[in-house]
Amino acid sequence: MSVQKREVKIVTTHQLQSMKERGEKISMLTAYDFSMATLLDAAGTDVLLVGDSASNVMAGHETTLPITLDQMIYHASSVVRGVKRAFVVVDLPFGSYQGNSSEALRSAIRIMKESGAHGVKLEGGEEIKDSITRILSAGVPVMGHLGLTPQSIYKFGTYSVRAKEEAEAEKLLSDARLLQELGCFAIVLEKIPSSLAKRVANELHIPIIGIGAGPHVDGQVLVIHDLLGITKEFKPRFLRRYAELHEIITGAVSNYIQDVKSLNFPTEEEAY
């Protein structure tokens, strides 16, 4: 029986751990389709997150809650096909793991088998420990997510900074220690005080990735549409735009429309 060979991915959980140990920062970006994943991978991004933020930037929903497991698998499969180097981690969507560890395991296995991704990410701490344990028992790498957890937006009622008060900060620290103890290979900390994120990164031996969590963590993640300036309305303090593609794209399309209507495109040289 022949065995189909697949190119081994260079970035692994082991390599990410080694990067933390030697002080090399981890770069992580979201990706939702083949073309963008190919570009981000070729540029050298360490981790590509197939985020449930696809619900916002790809589908136009107000929150991340509406996106389904089937839709996440579709996006993840597209990303994996464009990757040669990066580690690909996929968000388990809302409703696919909370409160039912068996459902969580089925969801994670579907993502791994049907998309070819390398790990999954779950939001929460103590309240989802059974789901994390069940997924890890099947050999699926799990990344945690604490702080501002967008799937819980209706509980929080706001996207403001989390864990500013002592009680919530201590809960976050306790949850972070628990996620490490359970076996998570890394944790994302979203929109929490920089001093708290620094404490978590210093206390834990697994990589801590920040988004709006300051510079004292082991890596950073941003939504690619925000980084490239494709989105315009979203302007949090932590976001640095490295390009302004909104203007470039709309300008290019406007020029195309003008050329079509004025009969300047296509020219005879552009015809067969």
Image (tube, rainbow, N blue to C red):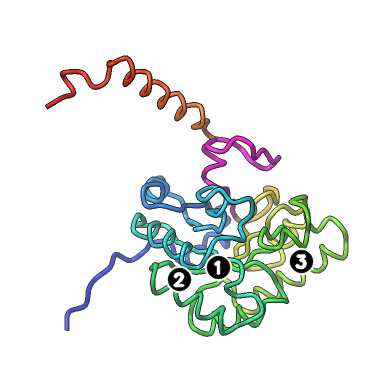
State the quadrant of the N terminus.
bottom left
Residue at (55, 48) in percent of width and height: 60
Where does label 2 land, which residue? Answer: 111
Classify 238 as above or below 70: above
On the image, numbered disc 3 is attached to which residue?
172
Q: Which mark is residue 19?
A: none
Structural crowding at the residue carrying mark 3, measured as other residues with C-alpha within 10 Å and reported as few (<14), some (14–19) or many (≥20): many
Report the residue that reaches farthest toward the left: 272
In the displayed structure, 141 sits above or below 47; it is below
Question: What amino acid type should be assigned to the residue bearing mark 1?
Answer: Leu
Percent position of residue 33, x then y: 41, 52
Splitting the image into 4 quarters, where does residue 53 fall? bottom right
Closer to the N terminus: mark 2 or mark 1?
1
Look at the numbered discs 2 and 1 and tell me whether their residues touch, using CB distance below 8 Å.
yes
Whether residue 94 is visible here, answered yes or no, is: yes
Q: Any magenta on residue 227?
A: yes
Span colored in magenta: 219-241
Relative image position of residue 67 (x, y in whole percent): 55, 61
